[in-house]
Amino acid sequence: MSEIGTTKVLEDNLVTLRRTSGLGGYLRAIGAIVWKDLAAELRSRELLGAMLVFALLVVLIFNFALELDIRTRETVTSGVLWVTFAFAGTLGLNRSMAVEKDRGCLDGLLLAPVDRSALYFGKALGNLVFMLIVEAIVLPLYSVLYNTNLFQPGLLAVILLGSIGYVAVGTLLSSMAVQARTRDVLLPILLFPVVLPVLVPAVKASNGFLLGFEMAEIWSWLNLLIVYDVVFIAVAFMVFDYVVEE
Amino acid sequence: MEPMPKVLKALNWITGALFVVALYMVLFFAPREAVMGDVQRVFYFHVAAGWVGALAFLVTAVTGGIYLARGERRWDLVALASVEIGVIFTFANIVSGSIWARPIWNTWWTWDPRLVTATVMELVYLAYLMLRQGIEDTDRRARFGAVYGIVGFLSVPLTFLSIRIFRTIHPVVIGSSDPTALGAFDMIPKMRVAFFFSLFTFTFVYVTLLWHRLRLQRLSEKVEQMKMKILSV
């Protein structure tokens, strides 16, 4: 606990956090945590850079592994994209929680007189923002490199929904993984099987939009995706307290 | 050494006897399926093992919830014991399915949604065991186990939904059956009796194993305490 207040950013935000009560206060607390993450990232730029380079490497490896010629590309694009996002996302999730744990920042945050779930939503939103930034850069790059138009409103909506579900359960599990001895290897093992109900419909729905399927066919996948988004957010909201409790 | 409780002793015998009867039912009482032949008999224990797997994971999720609410350690022990049993039975479920699929689908394995989701379920609980291994603090281990047991159980409903949502070749014997599924059949009354008897028997096997596992845990803790006592003298 001795390290509380070592960073200026944290201090500023603890001041903000103390002024919290009611819904407005709750939202302000979430905003403060998101802002803290973004400000820290803006100054260090270690996370986004790593995620981006990693994402591009994954796309490149897929290029060689699958020989992404015109015809294969049509059918595997959604799969390639989602694997890329999932892998890059793990990197981000691990890092964003490890930073909190290593320098005792998490203890500082826990001392703040706000509801614990505000911490969860703050961290999750921060992670979501990072993931969306990476996606916002990978998508146009992929479009240019492979000469396919990925900018369809349907596909973008699926990517947003999928990222929300991924981050919702990922933030919860990463805050458990960082507290374990084997933390770096543990997160993907914990996360991937559990997040599959989000990834599978996301891949299928993206594929549907890319290949121009009927909306009726895509809707069943979208429904599943939305249901699991809600389920994961709700469960994480309920159990997050027990994960950070000392 | 504390003696085995009388009820548990009785349960051992009952479960053993039930299992012998179940074997007889599956192998001799149930008629030979007309199309698939004797290999169809795998079905009775295949579904029963899958049932125990699902039941065990449900118990883990529920006891995990109770642990989080009350903080009593015994609930965590039940959750852990249940996962261990569930992992073994789900594995038996997958392997026995494979043995059946070889002659019927002409392959040991196919990337059918039903098979994949069952495997994912298995992986979730292997991850559960790994998570527990990575944490030394018992209180935290119990809490994280409970949380992961609840979150992980959410992937199990998908297993059951999957036959309805995905296009699958896995037959659905109970409820609405898609006749185009490869290896589907209608149960005649004698088969039904054997089937439900297997389910019943396997449920007994589960309860017996769970009890033994909990007793083992208690005994090993006792041994640990005795060791400490001797060492400290």
Image (cartoon, grey):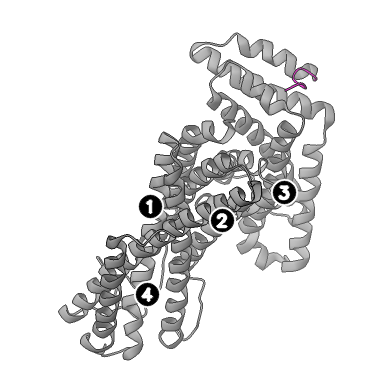
- Between the C-alphas of marks 1 and 2, the distance is 16 Å
Above or below — where is A113 with respect to B190?
above
Q: CA distance from mark 2 to mark 4?
A: 24 Å
Under mark 1, the amino acid is Val
* Type of amino acid under label 2: Leu
Circle 4: element type: helix
Query: Is B143 contained in the magenta span?
Result: no
- Tell if the residue under mark 1 belongs to the same chain as the one under mark 2: yes
Q: CA distance from mark 3 to mark 1?
A: 29 Å
Task: Look at the picture and state if A184 lies above or below A238.
Answer: below
Mark 1 or 2, nearer chain start? 1
The residue identified by callout 3 is A184
The residue under label 2 is B129
Q: Which residue is mark 1?
A: B59
Q: Which residue is found at the position 55% from the left and 39% from the top?
A: B139
| Foreground pick, A8 / A205 | A8
**Tag 3: amino acid:** Asp
Report which quarter residue A60 is drawn in: bottom right
**CA gap, disc 2 and disc 3:** 16 Å
Residue A122 position within the rendered picture, expressed as x and y whole percent measured from the top left = 61, 27
CA separation in Å, label 1 and label 4: 20 Å
Q: Position of residue B96 (x, y in %)?
A: 43, 78
Few, some or many residues within 10 Å of mark 2 (<14, 14–19, 20+): some
Q: Earlier in the sequence, mark 1 or mark 4?
A: 4
Query: Dot 4 falls on which chain?
Result: B
The residue lying furthest to the top in this view is: A19
User: Residues in magenta?
Assistant: A1-6
Discs 2 and 4 carry the same chain letter? yes
Tell me whether circle 3 and circle 1 mark residues in contact (CB < 8 Å). no
Q: Residue A156, relative to residue A79: is it above or below?
A: above
Q: Seen in the image, is A38 located left or right of residue B9?
A: right
Q: Residue furthest front?
A: B233
